Each structure stands twice: as structure tokens, then as C-alpha cells.
Image (cartoon, rainbow, N blue to C red):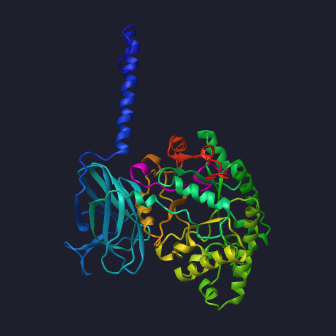
Amino acid sequence: MGDALEENTTEEKETEEADEADKADKADKALEISSMDMQYNPDFQLTIEAEDAEFTGNIHIESKKKGYSGSGYLTGMETDSDTVTFTVEVPGAGAYDLNFISAGNTGYKENNVLVNGENVGVTVVDEDDFTDSILERVYLNSGINKITITKSWGWILLDSLKITASEDADPSIYRVSAELADPNASEATIRLMQYLTDIYGKYIISGQYGDRGKNGNEFKAINQATGKYPAILGLDFIEYTPSRVAHGSVSHDVEYALNFHQEGGIVTFCWHWNAPEPYLVNSSDIPWWKGFYTEGTNIDLQKIMKGKDPEGYELLLRDIDTIAFQLKRLQAEDVPVLWRPLHEASGGWFWWGASGPEAYIELYRLLFDRLTNYHQIHNLIWVWNGQNKDWYPGDEYVDIIGTDIYPGERVYNSQSAKFNELVRWNGDVKKLIAMTENGCLFDPDMAVRDNAMWLYFGTWEGEFLVQDSTDQLSEKYTETDMMVKVYSSDKVITLDELPDLKTYGN
């Protein structure tokens, strides 16, 4: 464009020069996204004492507890207005490890970490003594950055922040075996798993939850905005649960899954497992339909799994068998399922996580055995979504490790710290890593930049995508421009870009 023909008018030349300048500007921005700043120093290290940071609200300096560095540590994180902000300067843009030296102040604590006002992950501490809490491979801009801790659980003692340049990204994390946890997996399931491992690290598969499938509001809104459909349809077995059916619930999610499979798509199911009827609180304040929440039940999973409540054990088997019937319908039609049961357990807000990791792991393994061996269901790719490494049931029960991330509104970074944390959660066998639920979309360019290539994302339904139960896109969590960017990215796979999974690998 710069070598315009001499006969062009001055106006045409000026237009072309403006176009050329615009292209150059876009190229420069793309380069900034895809590569590190040339001044990035791989040996960079910096330590800032917490008492030298800026703090607000109830936060104050204390020196009672032994083991701190500097002149003290910060305590008093009790309310949402209590924050600690470190102002740091780094020599170049790139990936850095953020190590918050802190103590738990009465046990396990999680709190939010923001970089330049945007949520990039959580700092976790589970020790009463001062210890490391590291977020790996967090992207910092060249020059000044603001790193802030805000209250999630609160109640931590914060001693210092140590920043080091991250080690080079390890490409081997994406070399994952296609061998499934179920040794008798169906051919269709094997083909899907092979496809997932083939594209892992190269592309990200788009996913969306929606209770009416491709004809639901979420899929319509995405298509109207982008001209594309997600490659993965997320559904829920919730309304098939016996204690909900007893109250009149009806579901057609299996039919939606069958239809989407015929369209060439991939299906994932979770299960908001309403507790069996005898264990429901079912009051005016906490009705029966809240029976998957801990507050909605009086079930004691630990007691059941230790054999001290045989009736409860039989009721759990009954519920599992009910869902097995629906999974068999999908198996009969050769539909492989990304199966994500007992999700978000470590948070404790669902009853299957309320009794701690031991009881949860026993239930997870029981579910695996009941479906795989007793019911001979072999169309499942097992997606574990316990949200904490201490709740991991073992490599032999897991194909994909997933996490659910709701960072806030219009937070588009890649959540690279959590991705790199999950990479280490498996045992001896590397697993695929997926963002199994998300509130807002992340920028695929940032995922490439940060080497955080999630296998897929699964945006939750309703308000996280559409306005007031319509098919109109809401921009509360993800703006339309970002939605278009994600679904147009050559790194994001949409429905029309999936291969024929019925013959893949043949």
C-alpha cells in the first residue's frame, strides 16, 4: 500500500497512508501481545515488605507472631474495604511469579489478587506459620504495576511479596496421553479423547451452557452477535434427580444433547444433585429445589460413606442409578459425554463437599465404579472439578482436570496463574486442563501470550450471557466486541470448525 501509483490523487495517497499507519499500529499491538518486551530480565527478583505497601480499612501493622521479615506484617483483613496494594516496577513486560509470604490466621484462607485492577487469581494459605503462596506466570506490564489483595475469605497475616521472573514455559505440559480412565471406553469416546489431546495447547474449544441447547437463548445470542455457535453444549442432569421429579420436575436435556450431537457438536453434563427426599430441609426459607446446596439438606455424607447410615447409602445408589439410565440413552446413540459430576466440592456450598475431602473422594470413586463397572457405561470422559488438589480422587479416575472461574465483570485476562496451578494437581500422569465454567470470556490472545491454553471454556448460562431470559446479548460480563473477538479467533474452535468426530482418526 505504501508504494501507491504516481497517478493517485493526493487524497487517495493520504487515505492509503492512513490505512497503512492503521495497519502498522495494529501490527505493533499484535506484536506486543504475542511477544515479551525486549527489556525483560529473566533473572529479575524483587521483595517488598507488606508494611511498606499501601493498605486501607482495618488493615494494620502487627509484630506479635514470630517468623516475619522486616519490621512486622499486616493483619486485619475483615471486610471488603480492607485491601493491600503493592506498587512494583519491573524492567520489562512478561510472566512473573508472585509469592505472597503469609500465614492463615486460623486455617485455610483464599483471597483475591488483582493486577492493575483486574482479577488474576487467588492467594491461598493453609498454614499457621508464614509460608509461600505463589501465583505462577502472571503477566506484568513493563514499568509500574499495582498488585492488590482484596478480601475473599480474609483473615490472613501478610508478611511480604516476592516477585521473580517466571521460568520459560514448558511445552511438554501439552503432551498428554489419550488413554482414558475407563479401559473399556467406547470407540466414539476414544475418538473424542484423541481429538482433545491432538488440539490441546494449539487451540481452545468454545463452550456454552444453555438449558435448551442450540435453540436456547444463549446459543441464539452468540450466533446473532458472531455468526458462530459454540462447539460444546453444556447441560445439567439436575431435573432428572428423583427428589426433584417427586416435586414435578421434567427435563429434556438428553434430547437436546442428542440433537446437538447430530449437529456435530460435543456435549458436557454436570449434575446439581438434589439430595434424596428424606434429607431435604424443604422449609419456606429453604425450599426443596435448593436441595443441592449444603444449606438445603441435613445429609451427613461422612456418616453415609462410613456405613453408619445404610438407608442414605441406598438412596445415593438409587439416585446414581437414575442418572445412569439417562447416560445409557446417550450411550445407545453413541454420544460421548464430557462428564463433570460432583463439581466445586471444596467450596463446601454443595452437600457433596460439606463433609470434607475424604468423604467426597469416596463418593466420587463410588460414582465412577457404579457407572463404569456396575452399569457398564463406557461413553464418559471423566472431568474432575473438585477445585482443590487435596480433593483429587487419583489419576485412574480422571481424564480432565477442570476449574470454575468467575473473576468478575469484563475481566479478560487468561487466568494463567490458575492454569499453571492445575497443571501440577494430577499425580504421575499428565491431564488435560479445562476452564469448565466461567463467568466472562478470556482473551485468546492473552492465553497464547501467557501459555495458558485451556482445553475449553464453558460459559455459564443466564445472566452471564443474556439479558433477562431473552436471546439478547448482555454486556455485563463480556462485551460484544470481546465476544466477537473470541468466536472469530483462529485459536478458538467453534461448532463449524469441529472435524467429523464420528470418523475422526480413522
Picture quadrant where residue 398 is located = bottom right
- In this view, 475 is above or below 173: above
Question: In this rendering, does residue 235 appear at all?
Answer: no
Residue span colored magenta: 446-471
* Residue in the foreground of this view, choosing between 223 and 372: 372
Q: In the depicted view, which residue is nearer to us: 494 or 50?
A: 494
Q: Is residue 102 left or right of residue 214?
A: left
**How far across and how far down the image is residue 31, in percent?**
35, 40
Closer to us: 367 or 299: 367
Confirm whether residue 19 shows in the render. Answer: yes
Q: Quadrant of the N terminus?
A: top left
Residue 79, image x, y percentages: 41, 68
Q: How many callouts does the rendering have? A: 0
Residue 358 lies in what quarter of the image? bottom right
Q: Residue furthest front?
A: 506
Is the residue 154 above or below the residue 29 in the image?
Answer: below
Q: Residue at x 45, y 70 (%)?
A: 425
Q: Residue furthest bottom?
A: 308
**Residue 380 horizontal/vertical position (percent):** 65, 65
Residue plotted at (38% across, 53% down): 117
Could you say where residue 273 lies in the image, as x and y percent from the top left?
67, 71
